[in-house]
Image (cartoon, rainbow, N blue to C red):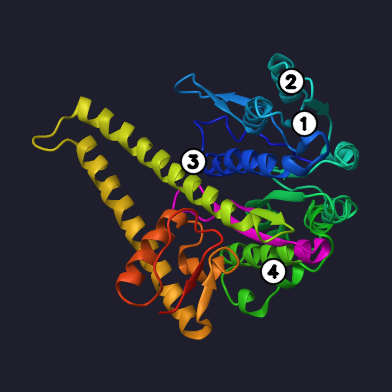
Amino acid sequence: MPSNDSFFQDPKKAAAVLKHGILRRYLAKFAGATATTAPGRRVAFIDGFAGEGEYRHLLTGVTEAGSPRIALTIAQDLRARDINLECTFIEKRPEAFEQLEALVQSSGDRFALALRGDIGDHYEDAVGRAAHAPTLVFLDPFGRSLDHDRTVAALAARGDTVPTELLLNFSLQAVRRMGARLYESEEAQGRAATLANLDSWLGGEWWQEEFLNEKLLELPREQRAHPAALAVWERYASRVRDALGYHSYDVEIRRKPTDKPLFMLALFFPRINALYSYNDHVSLAAQDWRRFLAEMEFAEAEALDETDPLLGESRLAEAKRRFADDEEATKRQAIDDVKDSVTLHLSKLGYLHVSKNLDKVLGAAVGIARETHIRAAWKELAAEGVTNGCPKGSLEKQTIWRA
């Protein structure tokens, strides 16, 4: 089974900025929230495809944090609040594991554990060691993940008395690549093994129905795999939800806004009250992602200004102005989307509880809008006579009423 591979061997990918921005925020929130009722204020984090832990940026020489470094830093911070975040990191590749083990040892964290080997060698034991502790499992492979049946069985066995959540980075590009072999000749070298591998990962042959969908088969062969992979993901996520009795929240992970998504990062969670804060974390991480992309553009513009300066406004100044305008437009669109969705659903329901009806409050702005946008939209709707007034403080437990 593959590990985290060389995802950071280039300059840090914007996709990882989004993914790790979500992880950094949500892990701290999950641990802080669940520790209050946990025995010994003990919380567990299991990172099934840990990688080296941190990575050196090839161009700048700056060390970038991977998920283990992020988790160890959070664990250290939480100890000041008398919370024990116990981290388990699993990594298969020998060289990557050596770096990971050195990182864990240098952290001085006596609760952290680095395990060498395939996730299949350690997964059930790692979940078992966290039997009585609230647990967040993070599965972030570069390719295929742990087999579906094993993924859900270990979590389902914990029951519903101990908070347990799964943050899964599902590789659409792996499904595209592997599933497309279904279109090859049955005698093609390696085809049977690849398809069997995909069956094992996804929990059966059901995914083949999506790749052999009649409408997809009308498309040119090179255009089929992406929509098929998206359909596979929808069914896979549904299977995980059904097996665990959970809800889920998906985030598309891509390098650039115009690129096809590489992964679907999904949080599977048992209680709907996790959704409100998680959406805020996604929104803030998406803002980081946009800023990261902009800073890459700033660096390119600045380099061009030095070698080929322009008369008047510099390329860098133009790029910064354009980014500020784009961010303002994104904010305005998010507020308008919330207003449209709230107005639509209030006409049918009469009221909306902000967190319990978050999908209806956010509408098309899911993952972009957060509480600050909801507040702005609510205030505007109240001023327009559409709703009751917007209260001060947190909106999570508030109700929007039709005026």
The answer to which image quadrant residue 355 occupies is bottom right
Cα separation between marks 1 and 3: 28 Å
Q: Mark 4 is on which residue type?
A: Phe
Cα separation between marks 2 and 3: 29 Å
Q: Is residue 295 above or below residue 139?
A: above
Name the residue beneath numbered marker 1.
86
Cβ atoms at labels 4 and 2 below 8 Å apart: no
| Residue 211 horizontal/vertical position (percent) | 69, 69
| Residue 159 horizontal/vertical position (percent) | 88, 55
Look at discs 4 and 3 and give the one toward the viewer: 3
Taking depth in this image into account, of 227 and 245 the one nearest to the observer is 245
Q: State which region is magenta.
A: 239-265
Callout 1 environment at 10 Å: few (<14), some (14 to 19), or many (20+)? many
Q: Mark 2 is on which residue type?
A: Asp
Cα separation between marks 1 and 2: 9 Å
Q: Which mark is residue 255?
A: none
The answer to which image quadrant residue 33 occupies is top right
Cβ atoms at labels 1 and 2 below 8 Å apart: no
Q: Mark 1 is on which residue type?
A: Glu
Cβ atoms at labels 4 and 3 below 8 Å apart: no
Name the residue beneath numbered marker 2.
109
User: Does residue 255 show up magenta in the picture?
Assistant: yes
Name the residue beneath numbered marker 3.
14
Callout 2 environment at 10 Å: few (<14), some (14 to 19), or many (20+)? some
Name the residue beneath numbered marker 4.
211
Cα separation between marks 4 and 3: 29 Å
Look at discs 4 and 1 and give the one toward the viewer: 1
